[in-house]
Image: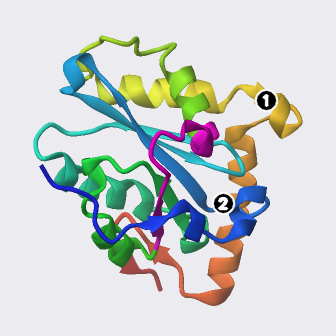
Amino acid sequence: MQTVVDALKIGDRPAHIATREEAGHWEGDLVMGKGNKSAIVTLVERSSRLLVAFALRPGNRSDNMHDQLIEAMGVLPATLRRTLTWDRGSEMAKHAEVTAALGTLVYFYDPASPWQRASNENANGLLRQYFRKGDDLSAVEPAHVLFAAEKINSRPRAVLNWSSASARFAVYAAAAKSADAIDAPLQDHSLGRQVS
């Protein structure tokens, strides 16, 4: 089993991230399935509370986590993927490679400190309304995970002044797209090439 080495601790993370005033800072975790043999990856953007969720592919967890994090976060503008904070699970053994690929700094929570990732813990609880403890998550269709995340993201929330996570994140995405259009040529991310 691989382990996390050379980890940046949450105490090293810039203090302004705790204010949630700047978009692009994420919390991540796994929702484990039956016998800890399957999992759903959960990523929560701290300011908007947007949930991104997907089933972790079977096989080597750290390899699959590395690949799937890059796929999921790589479509975001750099300003919306500034940092990711995770626990010290072995699935994040390749955190340095994630940072190199995305430019996203990865920080790690202190052991046994779930209050340090309150947004993610809350999102995991909401996701459990769709996927119960003890369920075999390897049998879950990707569309079902996406459906659950969309339902959670569309709920009005008191903490967001009765806006939804989707609506709040859309504002951030539009601002990032506008800023990127000024700073760099338009990129067609689906094709991986510059658009003329």
Please report contact status of discs 1 and 2: CB closer than 8 Å, yes or no.
no
Residue 138 visible? The answer is no
Q: Name the residue under label 2.
A: 173
Considering the numbered disc 1 on the image, is that residue within a helix, a strand or a loop?
strand
Specify the farthest residue to the right.
161
Look at 47% across and 70% down and name the residue there: 104
Q: Where is residue 101 in the image (x, y as percent from the top left)?
A: 34, 74
Look at 36% across and 51% down and name the residue there: 88
Look at 24% across and 16% down and name the residue there: 34
For residue 90, above or below residue 159: below
Give the mark, 1 or 2, whose residue is nearer the N terminus.
Answer: 1
Report the disc number at residue 157.
Answer: 1
The mark tally for this picture is 2
Residue 42 visible? The answer is yes
Which one is in front, 94 or 77?
94
* Left or right, 49 with reference to 62: right
Between the residue at mark 1 and the residue at mark 2, the CA separation in whole angstroms equals 19 Å
* Left or right, 39 with reference to 194: left
Which one is in front, 90 or 144?
90
Name which residue type carries label 1: Arg
Q: Magenta region: which residues?
A: 104-119
Dividing the picture into quarters, in which one does residue 8 lie?
Answer: bottom left
Dividing the picture into quarters, in which one does residue 53 lie?
Answer: top left
Considering the numbered disc 2 on the image, is that residue within a helix, a strand or a loop?
helix
Name which residue type carries label 2: Ala
For residue 121, above or below residue 93: above
